[in-house]
Amino acid sequence: MIDTDHKKLFAKGVDAINSGDMVSALAFFERVTQLDNSPTNRSYLAFCIARERGQFKKAITMCEEVLREEPGNSLHYLNLGKVYILSGQRTDAMRILREGLHHGEDKDIVNEMIKLGMRKPTVIPFFKRENLLNKYLGVILTRLGLR
């Protein structure tokens, strides 16, 4: 009985995420995690917490714990990558998503990477990307069509 309830709640949670109903997804994954504290359930719960509540630190910590338990599951890399994207940490998101591809071909990871887009190398490589000179030279050269 509990096993079928767990599976139904999990399926409803995934459906809610796919339909964009994050409030329901969060409720489903909170409940299913109480019934079964598996890494997959906690990974989805972490994503829901980040998306709905904006608790990025907590979500990142949860995802990292899950990755230590199941380092070979690409789904966990996808969820951590999405949390990094939500928190504005593009570089970390891209790193984690690339790492996830090493553990299995996942079309969802590839789609997230495509959404993020590949960045061009910096104009002046020995300066950081955030350096104002790099930023404005990149903008100017792009507008001139030289980059």
Image (tube, helix red, strand yellow):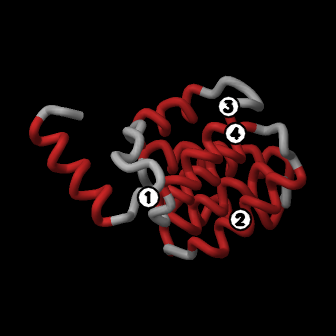
Q: 138 and 47: which one is in front?
A: 138
The image quarter containing residue 26 is bottom right
The residue under the point 75% across, 44% down is 7
Q: Disc 4 vs disc 2: Cβ atoms closer than 8 Å? A: no
Three-letter amino acid code at disc 4? Glu
Q: Which quadrant would the C terminus be assigned to in this image?
A: top left
Q: Find numbered disc 3 in the image and state the secondary structure of the residue it sits on.
A: helix
Q: Which mark is residue 101?
A: 3
Mark 4, residue position: 99
Viewed as shown, does residue 98 lie left or right of 15?
Answer: right
- Nearer the viewer's eye, disc 1 or disc 3? 1
- Nearer the viewer's eye, disc 4 or disc 2? 4
Viewed as shown, does residue 98 lie left or right of 135?
Answer: right
- Of the numbered discs 1 and 4, the one sitting upstream in the chain is 4
Query: Gap between marks 4 and 2, in whole Å?
Result: 30 Å
Query: Gap between marks 2 and 3, in whole Å?
Result: 30 Å
Q: 14 and 128: which one is in front?
A: 128
Q: Disc 3 vs disc 4: Cβ atoms closer than 8 Å? A: yes
- Nearer the viewer's eye, disc 1 or disc 2? 1
Q: Residue 9 carries which label?
A: none
Mark 1, residue position: 127
Three-letter amino acid code at disc 2? Arg
Mark 3 residue crowding within 10 angstroms, few (<14) / some (14–19) / many (20+): some
Farthest residue in the left direction? 144
Viewed as shown, does residue 96 lie left or right of 147?
Answer: right
Place of residue 29 in the rendered image (x, y in percent of width and height, measured from the top left): 66, 60
Q: Find numbered disc 4 in the image and state the secondary structure of the residue it sits on.
A: helix
- Nearer the viewer's eye, disc 2 or disc 3? 3
Query: Gap between marks 1 and 2, in whole Å?
Result: 48 Å
The residue under the point 51% across, 49% down is 17
